[in-house]
Image (spheres, rainbow, N blue to C red):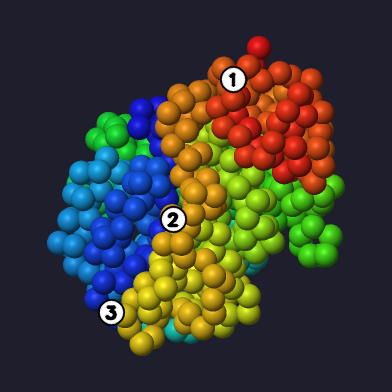
Amino acid sequence: MIDWLKDAVFYEIYPQSFNDTNDDGIGDLNGIVEKLDYIKDLGCNALWLNPIFDSPFKDAGYDVRDYYKIADRYGTMSDFERMVEECHKRDIKLLLDLVPGHTSNENEWFKKSCEAEENEYSKRYIWTSQAFWGIKDHPYIAGEAPRDGAYMLNFFASQPALNYGWGICTDEWMSAIDSSEAIDTREAMKDVMRFWLDKGIDGFRVDMADSLVKNDDDHKHATAAIWRNIREMLDKEYPHAALVSEWSNPDSAINLGGFHMDFYLDHWHNGYNTLVRDYEPHPDNDQSFFKKDSGGDIKRFLNDYLPKYVSTKNNGYISMFTCNHDTPRPARTLDERELKLFYGFIFTMPGVPFLYYGDEIGMKYREGLVSVEGGYNRTGSRTIMQWNDDKNFGFSNSDTTYINCDYDDGKRVSKEMSDKDSLWNFTRDIIHLRHQYECLQSDCDLEVIDTDGQLFTYKRGDLIICINASGKDISVDYECKEMVYLLGSYENGVIGAQSFMIFKGE
């Protein structure tokens, strides 16, 4: 494994909404540089940036027009190179967002593949042999190109699918996984990765990592083989570089695909979902573990998580996050005390944790926003960062911003930092404890001690973490020899309602 991941705590930045330094209402790379000391002080020593490549932004940059160019809205290549340098001056690692499964329909590769005359890009994307021949069980578009064929989509209409082959070929136009065109696509993506790694970055978060090969038997074979091949390249040429997958299947992503980390995504009723977002489709019946007196049960999480943790612990890390750009912010339903308990859990569990910008101050999910750049219901988690009480919360001096800030949830970084009891200071304290105690970091084993409804106690090395997420005091039968951290109360074997503690036991 990569050594620096053992003590890594990531901060995810949605660049559009983080910090604007040229007053155009959109965040930029220089804005990120301006806040690196803030991120470092918080305790985060690694960054993941959502896509910054040239794009028409029909899907917030997940529609790449040019993999080798920085989007003008964010700055220049010189600005990027300066950002890498400034990150590394502060011992902050940097991951970029790689979108390997599709491009924008404005990408030059795709434009050339649309030409009627065959060329080197004709098979870079998935095309049928006739414009009147669709693609069963897959979205596609026909009648929009000079060439005779329909092309497959990976998601939105602006995102044609790149061709990595088909695990099972049922039609003559389908490429085999070992075909020259499938291999050429893989190698082209390797070249994209090399370009940015040579610029000094430290790896990639991989968007829709399981979407490459079609008809691939649950993505466990051909798609995983592509990532193993890429991992072999990284181990040989860039052994410091890390990969984290948007897959949420650690056996496939880590054990088979060779990813260093796999995100534990917020999927319907999986273990992670039961922690803070178990309120759909009935918000009045929230059974999330960290929701006070919800009746939630930590065993629902553990029954899903533990087998995945055990099967991958020697090969890679399961990464949990406070939130991400696709997920409703936890403050949508959790109050500040509930958020503190949740973050205490996130940053004391095994694996490599991720903190989403603004979650450290409890920024709210903004309900009912009109979609911005393909965000739809995700737009409410992509609002501008709330730094202070200046114009536009200190994000920008522009008269308009990326997402209009005609709301005020009262959260400000400036206020949170000055309040010793704030969510910001709690988050900072726990992250710094993680750095201080090696047994709280990514590698150290997890031992489950107590799982009684909304009580969860677990051991990591010589430290015991106890969380009482309920609204009542609970008696426990383990003694505290030395208290390392306490939120709430503990006395004479009773842990108080909504309390979190780290201690050394007998």
Residue 369 in view of the camera: yes
The residue identified by callout 1 is 482
In the picture of the structure, the residue carrying the numbered disc 2 is: 418
The answer to whether mark 1 and mark 3 are in CB contact below 8 A is: no
Q: Is residue 136 above or below residue 305?
A: below
Dot 1 or dot 3, earlier in sequence: 3
Q: Element at badge 2?
A: helix
Residue depicted at x 40% and y 78%: 392
Q: Residue at x 69, y 36 (%)?
A: 489
Residue drawn at 67 percent across, 58 percent down: 335
Report the mark closest to the observer, 1 or 3.
1
Q: Earlier in the sequence, mark 1 or mark 2?
A: 2
Is residue 295 rendered to the left or right of residue 210?
right
Upstream in sequence: badge 3 or badge 2: 3
Whether residue 85 sits left or right of residue 333 in the image: it is: left
Quick check: 478 above or below 97?
Answer: above
Tags 1 and 2 touching, CB below 8 Å: no
- Tell me the quarter of the image containing the N terminus: top left
Q: Which mark is residue 23?
A: 3
